[in-house]
Image (cartoon, rainbow, N blue to C red):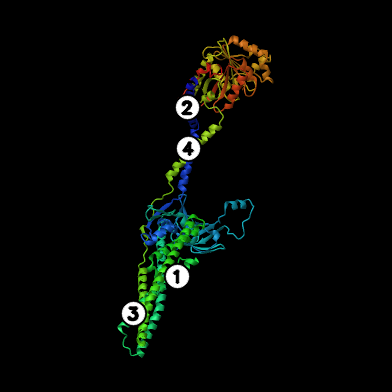
Amino acid sequence: MNETSINPQNNIDEDEIDLKEVFSTLNRYKYSIVAFAIAFTIGATVFAYFKDNVYEASTTIELEQKGRGMAGDDVMSLALGGSGANIDNEQYIIKSRFLSEKVLDGLDIGTRYYTKHNFRTVELYQSSPFVVVTKELDKRLNGTKFTMKIIDSERFVLSMTPQVGLKEKLLRSFGFIEAPADVPGAYEQEHRFGEEIVTEWFTLQVNRVFDLVENEYSFTITPNKQMAGFLQSGLSTSLVSKMGSIVRITYQDNVALRAEQVLNTLTQRYLQQELEEKTLEADQTLKFIDAQIEEINKDVEQSQSKLEKFRSKNTIVDAGSQAMMTAQNMADYESKLQALEIESNVLKNVQGYVNSGKDLSGISLGSAAYTDPALAQMIQKLQESIMARKSLLVEFTELHPDVIKLTEAINSIKSTIKFTLKNDISIIEQRKQTLRHYIRKYKRSLEALPENERKLANLTRNTLVNEKVYNFLLEKRAETAILRSSTVSKTRVIDRAVVPDLPIKPKRLLIILVGMILGFIVGIALAFLRAFLDDTLKTAEDIDKITNIPLYGAVPQRKDKTTRSQFEEAMRVLRTNLQFVGGGKKSKVVALTSSISGEGKTTVAVALAKIIAATGKRVVILDLDMRRSRMHEEFTISNKIGVSSILSGHNTLEEAIQSGVEENLDVITAGPKPPNPSELLVTSGFDEMIETLSEHYEYIILDTPPIGLVTDAMILLKMSDVGLIVARANYSKKSFLKNIERFAREHELHNLGFILNGLESSKKQGYGYGYGYGYGSGKGYYD
């Protein structure tokens, strides 16, 4: 139960420590984080400034929903998957290369002109002070940049460097491959405006239109017909509503005027091709009717000529009323039979086209369209689907899903047309049989008449039949001509495109904001990465987390008056902590060591000796780092006689002690560097020296060599009352703390403690407070 009550608190503490570490890491690397944010913001600002503006023009058109509410609509809905499929096809046609090439017939955008303004490249669309007339251009120079440096109002220097891929460029630069002899090379020559520039690779002429303001211009040349892909890349279509037929067409371009012109030209060409498609059928119908009229006209003339000759040779004034009525009725039925023959021939012709698999995009039902409007609508739908499929095949293969869908729809429509044609032909044949029956009946009635009357009735009948068929065809021709002349596009433009005022891209403020945020993210990520890879101590909490050895004090850096005061306060806390350790001995031996040199061990030892002596206690400090002695520099005293002199027997202890350095503080320096410092420290003379000093001093401060380099410190730590290990923030390795703890456990050292030196100072925090627990139980290790 006790563990249950303690563990949640421990988890909370750990979470708090982790959160504190996060903020500590952010605070530690705050300048680098801000630097990254500023750098990314500047980079994003530069990128946003140089990125080209993108303008968007839009137009809306209402498409004709063909077949809506008619008999063929159900068939086509089944074939194409609903009325929306037709609108989808029209959207593909709008974005097709076929229509883009028609747009290019009315726009010349292949030659593009540029200049630099405020370090940015600006395209001069229809505002260039000069015009380039291209007569010949090698296709390998398509899109190559030509640069013009203006000399004066009459002369300029034209230069050009052919575009080479990066891979080929590198291979050429390292000499692995050589440039082919037949490829265009770099060009730079002086020319005059209006002069014809003739080279092996291009022939062009630069004509000045008005005064040139800038010192440098450039232009690129691409054949206008090859700009279809450029147009297609900026086009997009969308339905205004799912159930409607209004389509919004948008075009994005770096030039606002060109965006408006492209869209308006596109809608014009779309309406134009739709009208051409509609008038094509009427033209084919008129052609068919004209051919029939020409043949029937010959028959009319022949029959009238025969009738006149017969009357001139015979004295028959007129046939009887019964004979004339019979002949007239017979002529009516024969004219109807002939009209059915025409329709039957048309339908059989279409049936032959469908069965043979020929292209049906140009066929027409002619007069048969009036008999079966549903069949005409189906053929019209089929032609539209075939056209849409051809448009898709310009950009996609036959395996594309949209092409497959249209192919299946075309096959379905063909099957429906075959069935309808077979049914219509059968119905016409039945009507023809009925008409032939009545014609035979009237023919038998005429045979009963006298010979001259019978001949006259037959001639009159033939003339009437031909005249009725002729009048029928003239009527149909007039109807078709009226239909053709009144053909208008049911697709209408609702809103024309206008020149956009403001660009839609780039969102410069957004780019800058994203750059700044990205800079913060990268800076924070690198800060945590650096913190993860950084194995040095940073704060007192690091010592608490890594080892159970207590912390006796945290000492800040001494930089100015404020930090010096904080340093002295931290040393006072350390002095207070030392008063509670040592078992109440009359004299305390305090040894200070570190992992490596440079951690401030000697500085802390000297400062500790001074702060203890300031309380009136007798203190002596010994420099036992005989390999790299430095204490005499701290006190600015002589190092001729010291510990090495005493232990080697050259001088006495009294001779080595330098008194009066500070009040209540004596110093014994290291002395001359001996060849065997470790052996000197294990002699009985060193123990006797410490015992003698213990009789005269209350504190004996030992400045020992670094424990990570030599074994001297281990000997001295064992014989001291308190062993202080100095670590330096942002310098000492965390792994050193673990090694010290293992070292203390193996050698049963229970008198160790840490001093964290070199902490970053802050006016809002003190150092040393909060670490008084160091003299107590620690964290369980000493218990």
Nearer-the-camera pick, 12 or 758: 12
Q: Nearer the viewer, mark 2 or mark 3?
A: 3
Question: Residue 93's spot in the image, x, y percent?
Answer: 44, 59
Q: Tag 4, which secondary structure?
A: helix
For residue 328, the mark is: 3
Residue designated by label 2? 16
Numbered disc in front, either 4 or 1: 1
Please name the amino acid that badge 3 sits on.
Gln
Kindly report which numbered mark, 4 or 2, lies closer to the viewer in this rendering.
2
Mark-to-mark CA distance, 3 and 4: 100 Å
The amino acid beneath tag 2 is: Glu
Q: Amino acid at mark 1?
A: Lys
The C terminus: image quadrant: top right
Could you say which is closer to the camera, residue 129 or residue 105?
105
Q: Disc 3 or 4, which lies upstream in sequence?
A: 3
Residue 520 is labelled as: 4
Horizontal and vertical percent for residue 406? 47, 58
Residue 311 vertical position relative to residue 329 in the rendered view, above or below = below
**Residue at left 33%, top 80%?**
326
Instruction: Identify residue for label 1.
Output: 348
Q: Secondary structure at mark 1?
A: helix
As rendered, which of 387 and 57 lies closer to the eye?
387
Dot 3: element:
helix
Secondary structure under badge 2? helix
Instruction: Give how far apart the Cα atoms at labels 1 and 2 are.
Output: 91 Å
